[in-house]
Image (tube, helix red, strand yellow):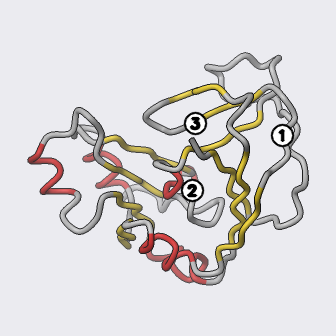
Amino acid sequence: MRLFHISEDPTITIFHPRLPERPDLDATKGLVWAINERCLPNYLTPRDCPRVCFHAGEQTTEQDRQHYLAQASHVVVIENKWLEVLKNTSLYLYEFDSNGFTLQDDIAGYYTSELTQMPINVSEIEDIEKALLERNVELRIVDSLWDIHDEIQHTSLNWSMCRMRFAQPRH
């Protein structure tokens, strides 16, 4: 299993556990977060870019596959105001040895470690659109994320919504 951390910072040499801000986690246990390869596309955007991402899971119906995944196996939807930022952002893909990590959330692909971690490899992604395409990910551009945000939650797909606080306001 391959685990990654994606950052706009090319200088990270060591990942120290940080206390989580999420209310559903123990606020006294620091964690290093990683993402599995299946869900990696969810993070191939600029950090603060709001996005709705989805892909098929074991429970996904054929109808949902055909309707939402006709062009690719994974979809990342961003707002059009973020497209230029995406085109002008480089990302750094830090890979971890999976030892010491435990599954936090299977659908989201999250793994955590309470131990300090050092990356075993770092690579630069200069062209995010190309990196998504190479992973059979469709990048969809919309004016507002709120329609797909509301809709996708009522499907059989595995979905993730990130940085929605930065999304255009609902109309």
Q: Nearer the viewer, residue 46 or 131?
A: 131
Q: Quarter of the image containing the N terminus? A: top right
Identify which residue is drawn at 85% across, 46% down: 118
> Dot 3 corresponds to which residue?
110
Circle 2 crowding by C-alpha within 10 Å: few under 14, some 14–19, many from 20: many
- Spatial CA distance of label 3 from label 1 is 15 Å
Look at discs 3 and 1 and give the one toward the viewer: 1
**Residue 76 falls left or right of residue 124:** left
- Spatial CA distance of label 3 from label 2 is 11 Å
Q: Is residue 140 above or below residue 154?
A: below
Q: x%, y% of residue 59?
A: 22, 32
**Residue 53 falls left or right of residue 71:** right
Identify which residue is drawn at 41% across, 53% down: 53
Residue 142 in view, yes or no: no
**Residue 55 falls left or right of residue 63:** right
Residue 56 in view, yes or no: yes
Q: Earlier in the sequence, mark 3 or mark 2?
A: 2
Tell me the number on the disc at residue 43: 2
Q: x%, y% of residue 106?
A: 47, 31
- Spatial CA distance of label 2 from label 1 is 19 Å
Circle 3 crowding by C-alpha within 10 Å: few under 14, some 14–19, many from 20: some
> Dot 1 corresponds to which residue?
117
Circle 1 crowding by C-alpha within 10 Å: few under 14, some 14–19, many from 20: many
What amino acid is labelled 3 in the image? Tyr
Q: Nearer the viewer, residue 129 or 13?
A: 13
User: In the rendered image, which quarter is residue 158 located in?
Assistant: top left
What amino acid is labelled 1 in the image? Gln
**Residue 69 falls left or right of residue 112:** left
